[in-house]
Image (cartoon, grey):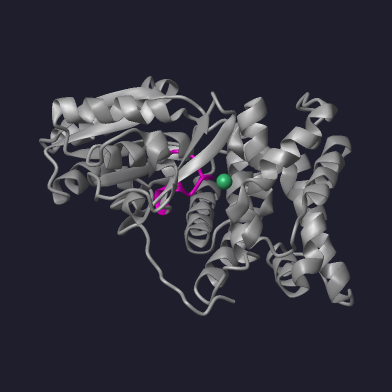
Amino acid sequence: MNSLITIEGVKKTIFGRGVVNQIGPECKSLGASSALLVMDSGLAKTDISTRIQDLIRESGVKAYLYPDVSPEPDPRIADLGAEKVKKDKIACVIGVGGGSSMDVAKAIAVLAKNDGKAVDYIGLNKVKNHGLPTIMVPTTSGTGSETTFTAVFTMRDTKSKGGINSPFLYPNTAILDPELTIDLPPYVTAYTGMDALTHAIESYTSTQAHFMSEPISLRAIELISDNLRGAVFNGKDIQFRENMMMGSYLAGLGLAMSGVGACHSLAYPLGSLFDVPHGVANALMLPYVLEYNYPGNIDKFCWMAIAMDQDVEGISPRDTAAIVAEVVYDLADDIGIPLTLDELKIPEDSIPELAKAAIKVERPLMNNPRPMTLEIIEEIYREAFEG
Ligand SMILES: [Fe+2]
């Protein structure tokens, strides 16, 4: 365990059914008379977008729409948003949607107060100045972006993914309203939920985990594994949605404090080389990574098996720890996640290229409970290819 711990994070979190109604007053409390609403074009056509714009305007705050976020966004989307903010002298930035929209919103806010382009700030601690105030309104229970200091982008010209990582990206306010997730289709619920589970498990078993992140991550594992099937199969039940939103938020807090692990390193190249959505890539790789990882921390894998409601009485710690990969595989199978790279039509001969890209995603690999080499990463991809 790391003995030097600094805890930073989102400044204010408002959680509960219907709390999106507080968005106008929250803008005002940040001193903003205008706000840029960052979302994707699909969400911009829904009642959620209209409702949020109305709520903001009713508070006397001018609302501008930026509905141009695409999945696995290119950093240029943030550059164009920042130009709009500067041109219209907009005072705060609101990210509404999944991780892509919130990440773009966080990047726009800092680019409004820092010269250059988003791509210049990919890396750790490259941002020099505070950005505009931000509010995050997730409409999925998955990414935890509302809690983190990261904005992830996909650079298609270099076929790579990378994040702007800076304490200046921590949002001012997270508005977590589970009612906003009630119409999320089952498949999106499934793979975003698996992304949240990956954050929970990887932050819990991270070599950077500590006395504060561990109970938060473990509670997230419990909430997500108890409620994800319900949210997928019975999505109109608000209790499942509420529990998933709590789980994904806690998983995001765990990730913000202790980082993620090798599953993220192996998932990133599937996104940058083959456009596999982040949640799907993590969900698919997670059981294979866990199967390799469990001997690296038998104790924590035992606690995870218990948090996932497994009856472990009379089973040795090693066998208990090994159960976690199976439980995660069965969950992914039940909720319709593709289980092999073959199912995603990833060519088998791309494995060496995937592995070379994965080993460059160094920070999560350093957090992993069991060290990985290039050969081991290739082997894990091969396992995931065949299932
Ligand atoms: Fe993730």
Nearest the viewer among 155 and 235 is 155
Q: Is residue 72 visible?
A: no
| Quadrant location of the C terminus in the rendered image | top right
Q: Is residue 118 visible?
A: yes
Task: Check residue 83 for magenta coloring.
Answer: no
Nearest the viewer among 102 and 54 is 102
Q: Quadrant of residue 109?
A: top left
- Residue 218 image offset from top left, x and y in percent: 60, 66
Residue range in magenta is 139-147
Left of 187 or right of it: where is 382? Answer: right
- Residue 114 image offset from top left, x and y in percent: 25, 41
| Quadrant location of the N terminus in the rendered image | bottom right
Residue drawn at the location 47% of the way across and 54% of the way down:
249
Outermost residue to the bottom = 3
The answer to whether 205 is drawn above or below residue 172 in the figure is: below
Residue drawn at the location 57% of the way across and 64% of the way down:
217
Give the total number of marks visible in the rendering. Answer: 0
- Residue 156 image offset from top left, x and y in percent: 54, 25
